[in-house]
Amino acid sequence: MLKIPRRLHPTFSLPLLVLLLTVLVTCADNSGQTVAQGKILFDEHCSACHRSQGQGGIGLPLNVPEFINNVDDFYLKASIQRGRPGRIMPSFDDLNTNEINTIVSYMRSWTGKPGKSYPATTISADIGSGKKNVYTLLRRLPWYPW
Ligand code: HEC
């Protein structure tokens, strides 16, 4: 006669399976939720200048893979928090860390890539020629008017 096991192997016990599924669903749900919340915050604070998908308007286009995939989270967070004094982009020092992280999660969802990470090494440079190089570089970007 066929022997029907009374209990499943302990590894596959039902409570454990339920727990595992709950954890998985919660994780998946959380990241989706974070991105959705980030979009709400982005629409509220950023879209007037950068448009709702970051296509750019008064503010630079941000939803450009060459840009977004090559900057690290620190750069984005610092840009949001400090703004660009004297260059229209306001500082958002009234947004808390959690809100800024959430906005960055939304921005990362545009390409689905985590962005680069750069080692925090100290470099020394000549400020004068550094500035000249930066301006030369900026003038080559299509969205700079000069
Ligand atoms: C009032 C318009 C305005 C608003 C609102 C605004 N930005 Fe900007 N943003 C700009 C402008 C203009 C620049 C370019 C600044 C410059 O010339 O250096 C910029 C630059 C940036 C940069 C740097 C881009 C680069 O190439 O280095 C990031 C990142 C950015 N904005 C993100 C945001 C986010 C996120 C928000 C919302 C929390 C936001 N901005 C809100 C106008 C705005």
Image (spheres, grey):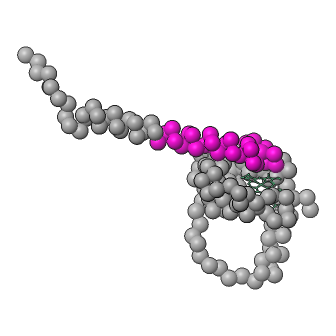
Residue farthest toward the left in the current orientation of the protein? 1
Q: Which residues are magenta?
A: 27-56
In this orientation, which residue lies closer to the viewer: 18 or 121? 18
- Residue 130, image x and y in percent? 78, 77
Q: Main secondary structure of the magenta part?
A: helix
In what quadrant of the picture does the N terminus appear?
A: top left
Residue farthest toward the top in the current orientation of the protein? 1
In percent of the image, x 57 and y 40: which residue is there?
A: 33
Horizontal side, residue 51 vs residue 14: left or right: right
In this orientation, which residue lies closer to the viewer: 63 or 85? 85
Residue 12 visible from this viewpoint: yes
Asked where in the image residue 73 lies, by quadrant, the reply is bottom right
- Residue 145, image x and y in percent? 91, 58
Horizontal side, residue 97 vs residue 137: left or right: left
Horizontal side, residue 70 vs residue 59: left or right: left
Q: Examine the rendered structure and indicate whether residue 32 appears above or below residue 49.
A: above
Q: Inspect the magenta stretch and tell me whether residue 26 lies in it.
A: no
Image quarter for ligand 1 equals bottom right
- Residue 125, image x and y in percent? 72, 82
In percent of the image, x 31 and y 34: which residue is there?
A: 17
In this orientation, which residue lies closer to the viewer: 22 or 55? 22
Horizontal side, residue 116 vs residue 59: left or right: left
Asked where in the image residue 88 lies, by quadrant, the reply is bottom right
Residue 79 visible from this viewpoint: no
In percent of the image, x 79 and y 58: which residue is there?
A: 90
In percent of the image, x 62 and y 40: which residue is there?
A: 36
Report the label total.
0
Q: Examine the rendered structure and indicate whether residue 115 appears above or below residue 25.
A: below
Q: Examine the rendered structure and indicate whether residue 143 appears above or below residue 54.
A: below
- Residue 109, image x and y in percent? 62, 45
Q: Inspect the magenta stretch and tell me whether residue 38 lies in it.
A: yes
